[in-house]
Image (cartoon, rainbow, N blue to C red):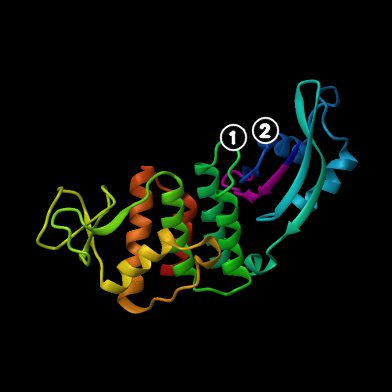
Amino acid sequence: MRAEFLWEVFTDTGAPEAYLLFKDAGRAQQSVREAEHGLPDDAGACPPDNRSKLKGACQLLTYAEFTVGEAHGFSSITEATALEMFPELRTDIELLALASYFAQLAEVLSQEDAASPALLPLILNALYALAKLKKPPRLVKAATELRLAALAGYLPELSGCCVCGNAEPDRFSIADGTLECASCRASDGVRMPLSSASLAAMRYIVSCPDKKLFSFTLTGSAEKELCDAAESYLLTQLERSFYTLDFYKSLLTE
């Protein structure tokens, strides 16, 4: 059994916890914790010397390939190869915090024992855009949030005003994921302002090819509109908050 992971560690209590994205992983999330912390010998755990060899592939935000085996009803990792470690993210606290948010999003939106063929490339491309391409973090964040919302089944309807059909409306309904004109109102939920530039960016993000997701630019008030709309929309649809996001945002205000 082979598995691909993004490894994230949070230390609220001092104990590491895995947040990862996997493909054909089976019981691999349990297996990674077992490989890192060990199991009783009679439970089929890796010997201590083997566990030490696996630690390089289990570092923070490492993209790695694992070979997972089963013995005595337990899963354990027998081989591990680090494919990309994104060292640039480890030396910048803001990038590290943002990447941690992406990893937690991946953990929330992925399903154990199920392949995530679109989720894995999206998160990897986002990390690559931050670490290697040096894309603006705010735009990478917004694009990743909107694309993740679409992958999770919350594709916004951006063709035009849901009331009058106007192709260039200037409001975005966070709860409904629809566009409205300022003078139109389909519901009583929160609406966020959009300029023609921020609307064009949203339409690009949800429809462009994967490899071109971060190939757009936006500045000034249009950038803020996009970032506010993308974050609010994703959090509203998922009906939850993320402490990794709270930490990232706290860094921006210090």
Q: Name the kind of residue labelled 2 in the image.
A: Gly
Q: Could you tell me residue 209's position as x and y percent?
A: 50, 62
Q: Quadrant of the N terminus?
A: top right
- Lateral position of residue 252 relative to residue 126, left or right: left
Which is more N-terminal, label 1 or label 2? 2
- How crowded is the residue under tag 2: few (<14 C-alpha within 10 Å), some, or many (20+)? some
Tell me residue 169's x, y (percent): 20, 64
Residue 16 position (above or below residue 167): above
Q: Is residue 7 above or below residue 40?
A: below
Q: Which residue is mark 2?
A: 26
Say which quarter of the image contains residue 49. top right
Secondary element under disc 1, as helix, strand or loop, is loop
Q: Element type at marker 2?
A: loop
Q: Quadrant of the C terminus?
A: bottom left
For label 1, the residue is 112
Task: Give, as a three-letter code, the residue at label 1.
Answer: Glu
Residue drawn at (13%, 57%) of the image: 164
Residue 65 shown left or right of residue 103 in the figure: right
Residue drawn at (72%, 39%) of the image? 32
Q: Residue at x 55, y 37 (%)?
A: 111
Locate residue 114: give its quadrant: top right
User: Can residue 9 be found in the magenta stretch?
Assistant: yes
Q: Position of residue 28 (x, y in %)?
A: 69, 36
Q: Distance between the Cα atoms at labels 2 and 1?
A: 7 Å
Q: Is residue 85 magenta?
A: no
Q: Nearer the viewer, residue 45 or 205?
A: 205
Residue 38 picture location, percent across and down: 78, 34
Find the magenta span and give its range: 3-14
